[in-house]
Amino acid sequence: MPATRTTLRRGLAAAAALPLLAIALTACGYGSQAKDDKVAPAAKGEKIDGLDTVKVGYFPNLTHATALVGDQEGIIQKELGGTQLSTATFNAGPSEIEALNAGSIDIGFIGPSPAVNGYVKSQGKSLRIIGGSASGGVKLVVNPKKIKTLDDVKGKRIATPQLGNTQDVAFLNWIAEKGWKVDPQSGKGDVSVVRTENKVTPNAYLSGSVDGAWVPEPTASKLVSDGAKVLLDESTLWPDKKFVITNVIVSQKFLAEHPAVVEAVLRGTVKTNEWINANPDKAKASANAKLRELTGKALPPQVIDPAWPSIRFTDDPLAATLDAQAGHAVKAGLLEQPDLAGIYDLRPLNKVLQAAGKPAVADAGLGVK
């Protein structure tokens, strides 16, 4: 898919007046507020940059498993030494961006759409994407009694998490490539796009209100456990079956003031991803244990077992795919073309990767100069 530099359209410039147009990754959809800060295992050793605490935000969601596992296993805290890791969880992109802008968190794990939205709304002053975390984990799942082929999707009601969110844009782009017409705002047309919070989608499916959904994990596998079938894995639409679903971002102010702490967190994420990929079963159990702690409920085997292998954990932010995703939003009529140059600063990550004997990653021409 071609990489196209893009940003918010005038409709999204009015996002404050039209909250649905705020691009957000509502991966699990369980509300939008941050939960109380939690602290990792006690810090030991010298403080980095003399800093007492670094505040990191993430979602209680499998596509944020780098954060879940890195926190649960103490891998990130180990790299921080005497600087204490403090975490806060979010369930929607806008609230995490607000927390980053307010200084309530310093670093965050977040999807591509809210990262782009936050960067553009601040005129390039609020954040940088400093690393990758996860790829994939998004599927089109359908009622097999109503939809047997991709062409059968026409005329059906398909749920996406939110107007303009990462999965909504991907589905609108897929619809356009099929040659079908849908109004991006109302969701009406050759396919009915029904914007539904992920926590509500399983009930909507069981009631027959929707015939399927284009959703991230674990919602996709929850629907499958309720009788749906996977019709399409979004990864098959991308080169090498890779596309960004979760990035690591940082406040530009924090990056300028505490670069050594940022590097320490990135060392932690790199080591966490390495451990996840080397120990998939242990990592799955670790992520689920953290989800149980954060949400009060672990994912059952029939949900987490098929969901986990569809997510790929990577240090590479897959910058060209973020650019392409923004291009899809432009084509759908949700964005106008801006300049995203400077949204990435991969110098700290590449320094960490070089020290670990790993190859550098690229910013697709969208890095700081």
Image (spheres, rainbow, N blue to C red):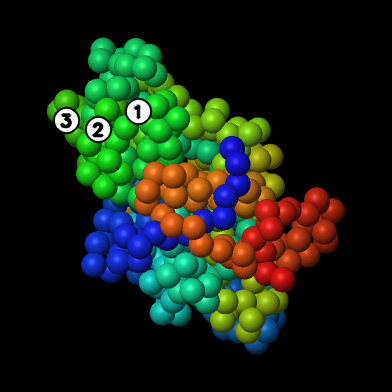
Residue marked by disc 2: 189
Instruction: Determine which of the numbered discs, if any, sits on residue 180 in the image.
Output: 1
Residue at image point 48% right, 28% down = 233
200 sits to left or right of 80: left
Q: Nearer the viewer, residue 164 or 268?
A: 164
**Three-letter residue code for mark 3:** Ser
**Three-letter residue code for mark 2:** Gly
Q: Nearer the viewer, residue 100 or 271?
A: 100
As drawn, 278 above or below 32: above
Residue 297 seen in this snapshot: no
As drawn, 82 above or below 345: below
Secondary structure under badge 3? loop
As drawn, 204 above or below 60: above
**Three-letter residue code for mark 1:** Trp
Residue at image point 34% right, 12% down = 148
First-in-chain label (3 vs 1): 1
In this rendering, the label closer to the viewer, 2 or 3: 2
Relative image position of residue 156 (x, y in whole percent):
24, 24
Inter-mark Cα distance, 1 to 2 = 8 Å
Q: Residues within 10 Å of mark 1 (few under 14, many from 20)?
A: few
Relative image position of residue 19 (x, y in whole percent):
26, 61
Secondary structure under badge 1? loop
Q: Are the two marked residues, 1 and 2, in contact with CB atoms closer than 8 angstroms? A: yes
Inter-mark Cα distance, 3 to 1 = 22 Å
Q: Nearer the viewer, residue 325 or 275?
A: 325
Residue found at the very far bottom of the displayed protein: 50
